[in-house]
Image (cartoon, rainbow, N blue to C red):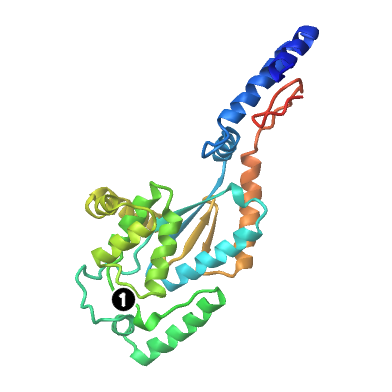
Amino acid sequence: MGYAEKTMHMIRENSFHKITLLACVMMLLLTQVYACTPESSSHTENKLAMSQIPKMKIEVWSDIMCPFCYIGKRHYEAALKKFPHADRIELVWKSYQLDPTIPEQVDPNLNAVQYLASRKGISTDQVKTLHKRVEQMAAQAGLNYNLDDAAVYNSMSAHRIIQFAKTKGLADMAEETFFKAHFTENKNLGNKSVLLEIGKSIGLSEVEVQEALSNDEYAYKVKQDIQEAEQIGVTGVPFFVFNRKYGVSGAQPVEVFLETLGKSFAEWEKENPISKLQVVEGPSCTPEGECK
């Protein structure tokens, strides 16, 4: 007697389990049919469920030319790894420009040392001393800085691309790539060919990069972020805002981020509890083909 005949024989002998057994057979067959699909239905459902879970929002105002913003990013990430509810945190990147007066066309021979010496009214030796201190701090966070040779440019174009990347869920990758390009690789992020190269490396197409650079909507979003920063009292970056209740200014130690995460999340969780159903169990089948 074959498998199908045995199954039908069992169904005829036990009418109570008829519906359950038929459902199990159908589920097993469907499992076999879809076993080679890129993503199982259960995995898709899990992802959908995770996306529907409420998350506490953390906003961070940052400029890719700010050395403490990259360090602050690393300290925050280190704190998040220690935080037990990291999956319920949403990080939102906000644009900020430390010096929007830098012209679009800058002397390519001008480096960060010369620029800062002129802007701050100090000697180039003093600038190099400051750079060494910041480089040491960056090294403690696992970052390799080359500040003396960093390029000088207006960061608006890079921020436009980051704003576009936000619409694709690529903001964090964009920030990370731009930071590394500026502080470690000393790339000129005011150069369109460089911006195109970086845009492609984070998953954007050439058309999308051009859209970000030409569509005024993304420049407007940059300016909106800057205006919002002024409204809430941001005077320097990085500036982290936890659930619009707590602010962390600067590249604070990991412990400060972790403490603020815990305090703000505890308050937020009380206001945003996850509703849990009281389930009455009964005969059922799972997407994996298990019936009980």
Placement of 234 over or under 71, stated as above or below? above
272 lies left or right of 14: left
Q: x and y percent of residue 217 in the render?
A: 27, 48
Front residue of 214 and 272: 214
In this view, which residue lies farthest toward the front?
1
Residue under pointer 1: 151
Q: Is residue 248 left or right of residue 188?
A: right
Q: Residues within 10 Å of mark 1 (few under 14, many from 20)?
A: many
The residue drawn where x is 21% and y is 74% is: 106
Comparing 263 with 251, the one in front is 251
Name above or below for residue 141 compared with residue 164.
below
Residue at 80% in and 8% down: 13
Number of numbered markers: 1
Q: Position of residue 154 (x, y in %)?
A: 27, 68
Whether residue 232 appears in this view of the structure is no
Q: Where does the image place residue 156, in percent across and percent down from the top left?
A: 29, 61
Image quadrant of residue 279? top right
Q: Type of residue at label 1?
A: Ala
Residue at (47, 58) in percent of width and height = 60
Foreground residue, 28 or 9?
A: 9
Which secondary structure, mark 1? loop
Report whether 196 appears left or right of 75: left
